[in-house]
Image (spheres, rainbow, N blue to C red):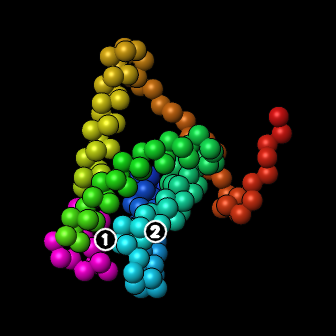
Amino acid sequence: MMLRRLYESPFVRFAVVGGVATAVNYAVYVVLVRCFDDLWPALAYFCAFCVSIVCNFLLSSYFTFRVRPSARRAVRFLTAHLINLVNELVLLEIWLWAGVPKLYAPLCVFLVAFPVNFLMVRFARHAVAHQAVHQFGEHLFVGHRVEPVEPVPLPCLLYTSPSPR
C-alpha cells in the first residue's frame, strides 16, 4: 500500500527520474574523463548532459507525467534545461578552478546546482502564474484542473507508430 502511494506521487516519480538522470550524467562524464584523459572537463560534462537530458525527457514523459513525448514538449523541455546547463558549466569551472579533481567536480556541481535550479524554476513558475492571473483574471484559474493524458505503456519507448490523420 505504501509503495503504491509513493508510485502514484508525481513528486516521488519526479525525484526518481531526476536521480536516474543525474546518475546517467555522472556515469557518462566519468567514462569520458577516464577514457579520454586530455578531454576538457566542460566538454565531457556537456556530452554527459546531452545523454542524460534525452534520458530525463523520455522518463519524465512516460513515467513522471505519463504523457507521450512530442517535438513541442521536447523543445520546451530542452529550453528550460539549457539555463540549467549554463549554470552547471559555470559551477563546474568554478569547482575545477578551486582545485577539486575533475572526477569529483560534477558531484559538487550537483550539490550546488540542485537548490539553485529549484529556486530558478520556482521563481519562473511563480512569475508566469502571476502574469497569467494579471492578464486573464484570477477567476479563470480558481478551481481549474488539468486532466492528465492516458498513461502510455512502457513498450512504446521502443516504437511509436505515426497516428492516422
- Mark with earlier residue (1, 2): 2
Specify whether 140 is left or right of 104.
right
| Residue 77: percent from left, percent from top | 49, 46
Q: Report how far apart the C-alphas of labels 1 and 2 lie in the structure.
A: 11 Å
Identify the residue at image location x=35%, y=28%: 129
| Residue 72: percent from left, percent from top | 59, 40
Instruction: Check the image and name the residue furthest to the front.
Output: 38
Q: Is mark 2 on a helix, strand or loop?
A: helix
Residue 106's mark?
1
* Residue 69 in sight from this viewpoint: yes
Region rendered in magenta: 98-113
Circle 2 packing at 10 Å, graded few (<14), some (14-19), many (20+), is many
- Screen quadrant of the C terminus: top right
Specify whether 18 is left or right of 108.
right
| Residue 150: percent from left, percent from top | 64, 45
Name the residue nearer the viewer: 35 or 134: 35
In the displayed structure, 127 sits above or below 82; it is above
Identify the residue at image location x=46%, y=44%: 79
CB under 8 Å between discs 1 and 2: yes
Asked which quadrant contains residue 2, the reply is: bottom left
Name the residue nearer the viewer: 4 or 77: 77
- The residue wearing badge 2 is 48
